Image (spheres, rainbow, N blue to C red):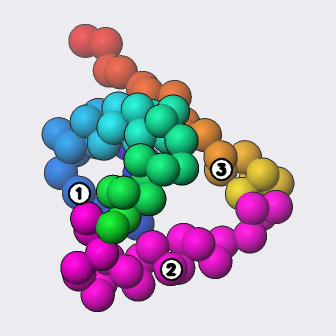
């Protein structure tokens, strides 16, 4: 399963995907409030700043604006 360059437990991926969709749907204010709560860590602030510098045209051009579909293994 592909996710970010960070290594996270695969059990967290479904929850994080769900949370991302829910928070995105709420709009900019709740996202801002979340950032405020997380901003006590310099490392988190660096990551937020680096994401803020991403060119939106690059995201659109390469189709990176949406999460890829969830693939499920059928046994």
Left or right of 13 on screen, residue 49: right
Q: Residue at x 37, y 80 (%)?
A: 45
Please identify the quadrant where the N terminus is shown: top left
Nearer the observer, 58 or 5: 58
**How far separated are the C-alphas under marks 3 and 2?**
18 Å
Q: Is residue 56 magenta?
A: yes
Q: Residue at x 23, y 81 (%)?
A: 41
10 Å crowding of disc 1: few (<14), some (14-19), many (20+): few
**Span shown in magenta:** 37-58
Q: Which residue is mark 3?
A: 64
Query: In terms of secondary structure, what is the magenta stretch mainly?
Result: helix
Which SS class for mark 2? helix
> Counting residues from the N terminus, which is met first, the one under dot 3 or under dot 2?
2
Q: Would you identify the image quadrant in which residue 48 lies?
A: bottom left
Q: Which residue is mark 1?
A: 8
Q: Residue at x 42, y 26 (%)?
A: 71
Q: Residue at x 30, y 75 (%)?
A: 39
Tag of residue 47: none
Q: With respect to residue 2, does 5 lie above or below?
A: below
Tag of residue 49: 2
Nearer the observer, 17 or 36: 36
Which SS class for mark 1? loop
Q: Give the x, y percent position of residue 27.
A: 54, 41
The number of numbered badges drawn on the structure is: 3
Q: Give the x, y percent position of residue 24.
A: 50, 40
Q: With respect to residue 68, does 29 lie above or below?
A: below
Nearer the observer, 1 or 12: 12
């Amino acid at each position: 399963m592909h996710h970010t360059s960070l290594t996270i437990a695969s059990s967290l991926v479904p929850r994080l995907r769900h949370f991302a969709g829910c928070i995105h749907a709420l709009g900019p204010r709740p996202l801002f409030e979340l950032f405020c709560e997380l901003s006590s860590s310099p490392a988190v602030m660096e990551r937020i700043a680096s994401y803020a510098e991403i060119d939106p045209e690059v995201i659109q051009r390469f189709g990176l604006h949406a999460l890829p579909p969830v693939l499920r293994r059928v046994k």
